Image: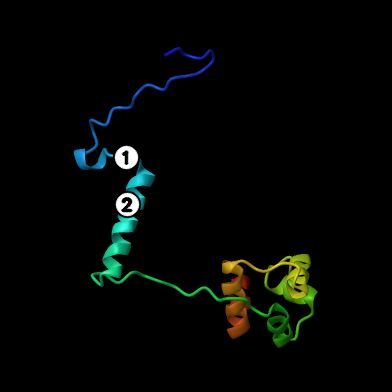
Amino acid sequence: MRKRAGSKVSPKRSNAHVPESSQKGTRLGRSLIKGMKQIAAHVRGEIELESYYVPGPVDVKAIREKTGLSQAQFAQQFALNRRTLQQWEQGKAAPDGAVRAYLTVIERNPDAVVQALRS
């Protein structure tokens, strides 16, 4: 086999300090295998996996109107980009999961969010 000009060959790293069972595959590969084993155990009913709820689509305009704030005031009060807020309300864009969760908290307890942001 001929070596191409300019290609570099990395020296092989030693795994002498790593236990034998951990030497197989990459860290990502080991993590994926571990995760699949957990899923299989969960499906068999052997373990309960942690889960959380991410809200589905939210009515951003209704949440804002419930606060009684204008778009500019709502964006400023809750550290959001005003233009992005407008796009959400017009249906030109949709908030991602984390923002939907944030908006759900604002809808349920806007005073707590304001207090948290001011602290």
- Number of the label disc, if any, that sits on residue 33: 2
For residue 79, which quarter of the picture? bottom right
For residue 113, which quarter of the picture? bottom right
- Number of the label disc, if any, that sits on residue 85: none
75 or 31: which is nearer to us? 31
In screen coordinates, is 19 left or right of 57? Answer: left
State the quadrant of the N terminus. Answer: top left
Q: Does residue 103 sit above or below 81 in this rendering?
A: below
Q: Which amino acid type corresponds to the residue marked 1 in the rendered image?
A: Gly
Where is residue 91? Give x, y as percent. Answer: 74, 72
Q: Does residue 106 sit above or below 21 in this rendering?
A: below
Q: Which amino acid type corresponds to the residue marked 2 in the rendered image?
A: Ile
Where is residue 106? Give x, y as percent. Answer: 62, 79
Q: CA distance from mark 1 to mark 2?
A: 10 Å
Picture residue at 27% right of the left edge, 39% below the top: 24
33 or 55: which is nearer to us? 33
Q: Residue furthest front?
A: 1
In screen coordinates, is 12 left or right of 114? Answer: left
> Is there a contact, CB below 8 Å, between mark 1 and mark 2?
yes
Q: Residue furthest left?
A: 20
Among the two numbered marks 1 and 2 on one chain, the one whose residue lies closer to the N terminus: 1
Where is residue 78? Give x, y as percent. Answer: 67, 72
23 or 2: which is nearer to us? 2
Q: Does residue 26 sit above or below 90 in this rendering?
A: above
Picture residue at 36% right of the left edge, 51% below the top: 32
Picture residue at 58% right of the left edge, 85% below the top: 108
Q: Does residue 14 sit above or below 101 in this rendering?
A: above
- Number of the label disc, if any, that sits on residue 25: 1
52 or 77: which is nearer to us? 52
